[in-house]
Image: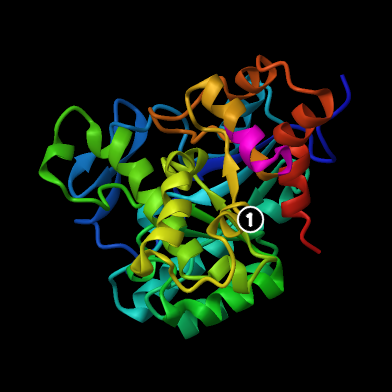
């Protein structure tokens, strides 16, 4: 079997909690997030509660790589734990949180580019500074940045236009990930629905807002990756298309059909359904889908590689999804 691409099999959705954030004085309020030893292992606590959803390695990239290799993955595209993508905090604190993460991630990538790439974070509440931090991240060797899906009062806001201009110019990956509990309906507090339903809905809202806001139409070279197979966005593409022609308020700021913008997104494979994944590849094209696991969380897919290989795809398509597409985005220059 020929290699999927120059980096081999690439997991494009792999989170890391940068330990220096917790150990560098003055960066994180320990009442918000902290590390503690539990049964001889370092564990992450959020607002005083252990992050029980973490079921794999979250702090040590070398152990993360070992776990990934056991699952058939050669290369990790690391992204910050989404709670470390700064929002709703003062600018100085937000920039410091980005700087600490970028320093560590850039060092990891420089030491092992064969097996590690990374995206960073930006102070998206401050668009001009977000542009500067994006430039700094890419100059340091990172492949782009992660944004929470509800960032910037949603991502199609006009005030974020300078950020999108710069992201397109730099050919940076922009990985859009649900913020967790970004939708605050009381019903989502039951049965883990905040994750199973709330997270994919949040991603769909972000994608639709970007598309109808005309961001991808104005910037067709953007490399926006939507987590979790785009959430429920693929399921509502028909509704968005119909609404654009039937309801004036739903037309957005588009000059062209909305499906042209939707077709410019990239998606990871974290769907937990082989039929849905096959449909995603068919509907959006094999060049738009990247292998992802969502490690180290309980809603991740530890069998992501075997799921793709079980679909019986054309060998060229399988190679693209397993690593060729991600390698192309990572090697932006």
For this rendering, which residue is in front, 114 or 203?
Answer: 203
In which quadrant of the rendered image does the C terminus lie? bottom right
Q: Residue at x 25, y 62 (%)?
A: 29
Range of residues picked out in magenta: 280-287
User: Magenta includes 207?
Assistant: no
Q: Position of residue 308 (x, y in %)?
A: 65, 23
Say which residue label 1 marks: 264
Q: Residues within 10 Å of mark 1 (few under 14, many from 20)?
A: many
Is 5 situated above or below 109? above
The answer, for residue 139, to whether it is visible in the render is no
Q: Residue at x 49, y 30 (%)?
A: 271
Q: Residue at x 64, y 17 (%)?
A: 306
Is 246 situated above or below 177? below
For this rendering, which residue is in front, 74 or 327?
Answer: 327
Q: Is residue 228 left or right of residue 179?
A: right
User: Magenta includes 281?
Assistant: yes
For this rendering, which residue is in front, 67 or 53?
Answer: 53
Q: Position of residue 27 (x, y in %)?
A: 35, 66
Looking at the image, the residue that sits furthest to the bottom is 128
Q: Position of residue 101 (x, y in %)?
A: 50, 61
């Amino acid at each position: 079997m020929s290699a999927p691409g120059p980096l081999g099999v690439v997991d494009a959705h792999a989170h890391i909690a940068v330990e220096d954030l917790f150990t560098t004085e003055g960066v994180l309020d320990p009442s918000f997030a902290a590390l503690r030893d539990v049964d001889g292992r370092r564990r992450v606590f959020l607002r005083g509660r252990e992050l029980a959803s973490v079921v794999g390695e979250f702090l040590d990239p070398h152990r993360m790589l070992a776990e990934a290799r056991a699952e058939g993955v050669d290369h990790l595209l690391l992204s910050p734990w989404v709670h470390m993508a700064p929002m709703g905090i003062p600018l100085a604190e937000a920039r410091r949180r980005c700087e600490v993460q970028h320093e560590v991630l850039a060092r990891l990538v420089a030491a092992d580019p064969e097996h590690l790439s990374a995206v960073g974070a930006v102070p998206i509440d401050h668009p001009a500074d977000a542009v500067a931090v994006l430039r700094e991240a890419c100059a340091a060797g990172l492949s782009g940045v992660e944004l929470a899906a509800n960032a910037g009062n949603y991502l199609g806001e006009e005030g974020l236009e300078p950020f999108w201009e710069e992201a397109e110019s730099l050919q940076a990956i922009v990985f859009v990930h649900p913020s967790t509990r970004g939708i605050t309906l009381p019903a989502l507090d039951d049965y883990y629905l905040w994750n199973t339903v709330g997270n994919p809905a949040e991603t769909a809202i972000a994608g639709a807002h970007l598309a109808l806001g005309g961001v991808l139409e104005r910037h067709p070279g953007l490399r926006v990756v939507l987590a979790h197979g785009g959430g429920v966005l693929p399921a509502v593409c028909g509704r968005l298309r119909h609404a654009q022609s039937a309801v004036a308020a739903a037309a957005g700021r588009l000059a062209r059909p909305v499906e042209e913008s939707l077709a410019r997104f990239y998606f990871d494979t974290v769907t937990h359904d082989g039929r849905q994944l096959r449909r995603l590849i068919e509907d959006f094209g094999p060049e738009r889908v990247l292998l992802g696991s969502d490690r180290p969380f309980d809603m991740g897919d530890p069998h992501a590689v075997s799921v793709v290989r079980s679909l019986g795809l054309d060998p060229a398509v399988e190679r693209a999804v397993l690593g060729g597409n991600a390698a192309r985005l990572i090697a932006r220059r």
